[in-house]
Image (cartoon, rainbow, N blue to C red):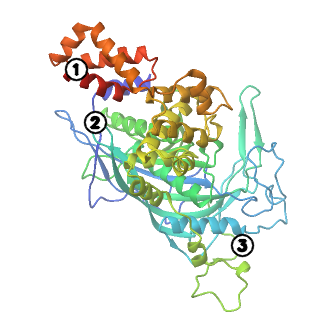
Amino acid sequence: MATSMLRWFWPGRRWVFARIGGGSRHGRGVPTGSTSSGKRGQSSVAQQPFITAQKPRKGEREWAAVVGLEIHAQIASNSKLFSGSQVDFAAPPNSLVSFFDASLPGTLPVLNRRCVEAAVMTGLALDCHINRRSLFDRKHYFYADLPAGYQITQQRLPIAVNGSLAYSVCVGNRRSQMVTRTAGVKQIQLEQDSGKSLHDSLRSQTLVDLNRAGVGLLEVVLEPDMSCGEEASAAVRELQLILQALGTSQANMAEGQLRVDANISVHHPGEPLGIRTEVKNLNSARFLAKAIDYEIQRQISELENGGKILNETRSFDYKLGCTVPMRDKEGKQDYRFMPEPNLPPLLLYDSESLPTGTDPQQVINIDRLREQLPELPRVTREKLVQQYGMLPEHSFALLNEVGLLEFFQNVIKETRAEPKTVTSWVLNTFLGFLKQQNLAVSESPVTPSALTELLDLLDRKAISSSAAKQVFEELWRSKGKTPAQIVAEKKLELMQDAEALEQLCRATLEAHPQVVTDVKKGNPRAINKLIGLVRRATLGRADPKVIKEVLERQLSS
């Protein structure tokens, strides 16, 4: 019902984005570090004004929307942040819980080197300043799946600060133009994940699974440099690709390895920023965009109808397509932050500051990690555009689907077909079939070698383009067959007998004098009808281009 009302209230409006300079911060003030727990807690994101300028109706005023994000990425590590327990998404409940994870008395944290390296590499990839000295803190709050009653995080001095994340969005009437935008990275911090509470409403009970308790998280806090759901979704997707390229996180949102909290407010341009709401635990880029856009419209609708926005936490109901209240944040929770007494300051070094004679296994060298950084998605896309002459949006499409770039590269390495042809087949035909069947690239019945063979047949004009599509459909259905076998079985090879084709074309012209008259009168569709008649006579085994050339030559003679 709420969605229908908003659809009625905002007919035909178009969002346009432009920055307003010199805006003020929220009056309530913002703490230096993040206070998010990954699942619960108060947001730390400061907000700056970005205008969501709409052409207002008579008597209406413009509104500006401000969006900031807190992104929690599970670190790709075999063990947890402070214990030796394994990390396994599919493990039976409470089967991967150490004494420390369960917070038994006398247990002490031991920092996981892999998690620290992952945080440093992520910070370097996002152009952050890496703090040579960072601190751990305890953030206290009570919840059933947090056995210690506190979370170990980095509130005062995180491991990385002041970076940037460049991402691209589609603009223009046909959304065919890519525009690059940048969101500031306020900080990256290491922290523990909590356990998982499973609410059983049927039995009126809550079950706790501590397998996730203590798993290492990277919290990436993005500055509020976004103004709509599309921008936020694009920024999160770009970060996801960066994390996957680095290997610091698998960032699988479906498995909860990447969760997003969005902070949203609206205001009139030139006025103080509005009260913000926080939408928690969004684990899909599509739902993130929908939740933000819905919340922007909800706040504007509320304010224009004389209501007020509450400083509250909300969740997104994907079935209803709207956000719903979770809890009020007006009474600020006191997390009683204090230094973690069982962990000393985390010290990092570079090549210049590394003490002489130090065992490399006992310290983390920032410069050494910088040398190990792989090629980032932005660079890969630029290379694809330069090397193969593809459109920027095609390079984005290749990287956005897991495994698709590797598939494309395997095909283009072996085939004699033009890069433009390969790009078209991979992005249109191959990817289209994958989406129809809801399959991943790794689950495709068509291998790179099979598509290579098919494109080679097409390139040397052994088959027509329409026959190639028939072969592809058969490849998709029949595992084990090669394109050449399918062509032979279905007799799809092109006619090589030029004289026979000449005779068929001449016979077609003689049998359809009215169509010939229409062609000579300048009807552009008439020639296509003749081509279709000839192709039907050849059972689709003649190339339409060749047929057209023969027909035009015979008509002009």
Q: Is residue 527 visible?
A: yes
Task: State the residue lying farthest toward the front.
Answer: 499
Q: Please, is residue 127 above or below residue 481 in the view?
A: below
Residue linked to disc 2? 14
Q: Where is residue 41 in the image (x, y as percent from the top left)?
A: 58, 51
Q: How far apart are marks 1 and 2 (CA)?
A: 52 Å
Q: Nearer the viewer, residue 179 or 102?
A: 179
Indicate which disc residue 341 carries.
Answer: 3
Q: Is residue 485 left or right of residue 324?
A: right
Task: Give the amino acid type for the residue marked by disc 2 in the picture.
Answer: Arg
Q: Dot 3, crowdedness within 10 Å: few (<14), some or many (≥20)? A: few
The quadrant in which residue 485 appears is top right
Q: Dot 2, crowdedness within 10 Å: few (<14), some or many (≥20)? A: few
Q: Where is residue 422 in the image (x, y as percent from the top left)?
A: 47, 43
Task: Give the amino acid type for the residue marked by disc 3 in the picture.
Answer: Pro
Which-is-in-front pick, marks 1 and 3?
1
Q: How far apart are marks 1 and 3 (CA)?
A: 92 Å
Residue linked to disc 1? 555
Q: Where is residue 326 in the image (x, y as percent from the top left)?
A: 55, 39
Label 3 element class: loop
